[in-house]
Amino acid sequence: MRFGIRTLDELHLSGKTVLCRVDINQPVDRATGTLKSINRIRACVPTVRELSDKGAKVVLMAHQGSDIEYKNFYTTKPHAAVLSELLGREVKWIDDVCGPAAREAIRSLKDGEILLLDNVRFVSEEQTLFEQKLRLTHEQQAKTLLVEKLAPLADCYVCDAFAAAHRDQPSLCGFEQVLPSAMGRLFEAEYCTVSQVMEEPARPCVFVLGGAKISDAFLMMQTVLSRGVADHIVTGGLVGNIFLTALGQQIGQGSVDFIMKSNYGEYIDRAKELYAQYGDKIVLPKDLGWVENGERREALLGEVPADIGAIDIGHETVKVYSELILNAGTVFVNGPMGVFEQAPSEYGTKAVWDAIANTKGHSVLGGGDSITATEKFGLTEKMGYICTGGGALIRFLSGEELPVVRALRHGATIPEKGE
Ligand code: ADP
Ligand code: MG
């Protein structure tokens, strides 16, 4: 048991039917029916392999969104082929979630065999529960069609979907009410890693916050500063620009227009308040970069031209940030330092990412674009830990209790049959 949750070590798996929820939601190319990335599928391989190796009949449940988020769900069929390839063993697939065909396929599994069900969001309850913000308690979720049809066929439930741990839905929180439950290896690794950052980070603990998702960044900052988790927060991207604006620095009208156009004006006041209280811990850019006629330009604060739009941090800032990062005990990273997607403004992110890759401390990185940047700079192998969970990670670091964690703690109290 860890954190009041069973691990795979505490379940008897041989010959048992295991319902395992994974998060293998990936960007899909709908024209060709292929997946544009397979990172999350790769990440759940250890758990699936272990369940199968230990002789369980493995039934995988997963969701897949689409480019039109929450409107047009997509099948999990391509995922089965990719998983099969990664595992080097057959992964059966069925175009049903919990109807008679799916149940028959589950009953006919032999020990060690793996079956992936179709997209759980094809079952309306799973979808309504978050799209319509209809709240069902975990006890009520246990009475939904999905759980009532599948739980009787299974001996236990395993959740390996840390990336979806903030979602309060039947496939994630309902089964733990009726089946002995455990977290999978990926869930365990991610949850332990982020708990370590929150509970007892090696000091000094440096947060690197940039990017464009301002609401997330401010929620995290408030929590990690008020709880004394972060010793330094180095800021870049839009986060840095908002703080500089709040302190009355001239950062170019283009930058301010962008903040206003993105409806982030309210955060300027939040930034003022945060800085008034924790100014000794919030580190701001000393210089900024922008692009003019395809060329990179930089200026120190105080010398930034009035008409530019800053989309990167500059060399002087990088020196300060790198020093802090290289000497940190823990580095938590979410959000790039600039528009790293284009060459003239990739410098700040690349240089800071190099420091993260070379820090003495333990680095933990999360967020879709932060991971893309890591891959772009070829630093994936040099990072301490790369989290698959974006939303779950942010919510955890914002001090929220994750619904799936609460459900798994309940599932830990349900004894196995014959126990
Ligand atoms: P993550 O996906 O890692 O959580 P975000 O989604 O919050 O990160 O932010 C990533 C995006 O922010 C990138 O597309 C990047 O181009 C953009 N970005 C970074 N700096 C700036 C900036 N100064 N102005 C506008 N956009 C920025
Ligand atoms: Mg992003």
Image (spheres, helix red, strand yellow):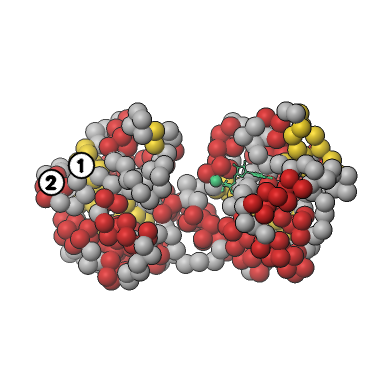
- Would you place residue 47 above or below residue 130 in this image? above
**Circle 2 Cα neighbour tier, 10 Å, few/some/many (<14 / 14–19 / ≥20):** few
Quadrant of res 118: top left
Q: Which residue is mark 1?
A: 95
Is label 2 in contact with label 1 (beta carbons under 8 Å)? yes
Quadrant the C terminus occupies: bottom left
**Percent position of residue 344, x then y:** 71, 31
Query: At numbered mark 1, what does the secondary structure look like: helix, strand or loop?
Result: loop
- Would you place residue 191 above or below residue 300 in this image? below
Is residue 165 rendered to the left or right of residue 91? Answer: right
Is residue 120 rendered to the left or right of residue 324? Answer: left
Quadrant the N terminus occupies: bottom left
Q: Is mark 2 within 8 Å of ligand 2?
A: no
Quadrant of res 358: top right
**Percent position of residue 50, x then y:** 32, 44
Q: Which residue is mark 2?
A: 101
Query: At numbered mark 2, what does the secondary structure look like: helix, strand or loop?
Result: helix
User: Taking the image as drawn, is residue 337 in sight?
Assistant: yes
**Percent position of residue 272, x then y:** 75, 65
- Is residue 238 or residue 16 the one in the foreground? 238
* Amino acid type, mark 1: Asp
Mark 2 or mark 1, which has the lower sequence index?
A: 1
Residue under the image location 43 percent in, 33 percent down: 36
Residue under the image location 56 percent in, 34 percent down: 375
**Percent position of residue 189, x then y:** 46, 51
* Amino acid type, mark 2: Ala
Q: Farthest right residue?
A: 303
- Would you place residue 357 above or below residue 125 in this image? above
